[in-house]
Image (spheres, grey):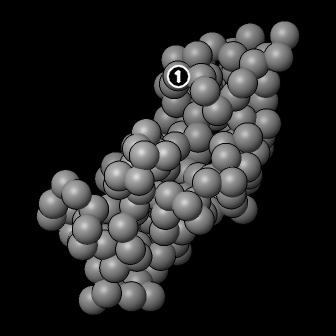
Amino acid sequence: MYIELTSLSLTAMRDALARKECSSVELTQAHLAAIDAGNVELNAFTEITRDIALAQAKVSDSKIAKNEAGLLEGIPVGVKELFCTKGVRSTASSKILTGFKPEYESTVTSNLFAQGGIMLGKTNMDEFAMGSSNETSFDGNCVNPWKRNDGAS
């Protein structure tokens, strides 16, 4: 049965993985392809962690096969640019932190990874998460995908 992997809810992704309708690698590759197809227009991701995501997905597939899956095992997600991720650019969308790559993991991402979550990359936001319009990001404005065709952002 063919399923549109990028349109599945989190629960549907988890169920599809458990029923072996897809692998975590396939799910991750589908989401990475969707990011590649839309990120230039949307500017939603400030960093795409393709190699990390695929490595995490392979580990998740192994855990799922051994019935050792965490609550989010094999589920690809974007991590808000606010959260530090070890060895990955983490600037809180601020120029002041240009080039910062922490040597530690935030509690949020530590918990996410401990339960098998897959990091697709870092998502754009207002500088230091101070705002709601995404007009102050050092990485530029992010376009709402639901409004991209009507010219609004």
Residue 14 in the image: x percent, y percent?
A: 60, 20
Placement of 125 over or under 138, stated as above or below:
above
Q: Can residue 125 be seen in this view?
A: yes
Placement of 150 over or under 82, stated as above or below:
above
The residue lying toward the viewer, choosing from 79 and 86, is 79
The quarter of the displayed image where residue 124 is located:
bottom left
Q: Which amino acid does label 1 sit on?
A: Ser
Residue 71 in the image: x percent, y percent?
A: 50, 25
For the point 84% across and 10% down, which residue is it?
1
For the point 15% across and 60% down, which residue is it?
131
Residue 132 in the image: x percent, y percent?
A: 19, 54
Placement of 17 over or under 135, stated as above or below:
above
As drawn, is 78 to the left or to the right of 36?
left
**Extreme residue toward the right, this view:** 1
As drawn, is 16 to the left or to the right of 128?
right
Residue 108 in the image: x percent, y percent?
A: 34, 49
The residue lying toward the viewer, choosing from 61 and 76, is 76
Q: Is residue 59 visible?
A: no
The residue lying toward the viewer, choosing from 67 and 141, is 141
The quarter of the displayed image where residue 51 is located:
bottom right
As drawn, is 66 to the left or to the right of 122?
right
For the point 58% across and 16% down, which residue is it?
12
The residue lying toward the viewer, choosing from 145 and 1, is 145
For the point 55% across and 61% down, which residue is it?
41
Q: In this figure, which residue is indicated by the disc labeled 1?
A: 9
Placement of 82 over or under 72, stated as above or below:
below
> Looking at the figure, which quarter contains the C terminus?
bottom left
- Label 1's element? loop
Q: How crowded is mark 1: few (under 14 residues within 10 Å), some or many (20 or more)?
A: few
As drawn, is 63 to the left or to the right of 141?
right
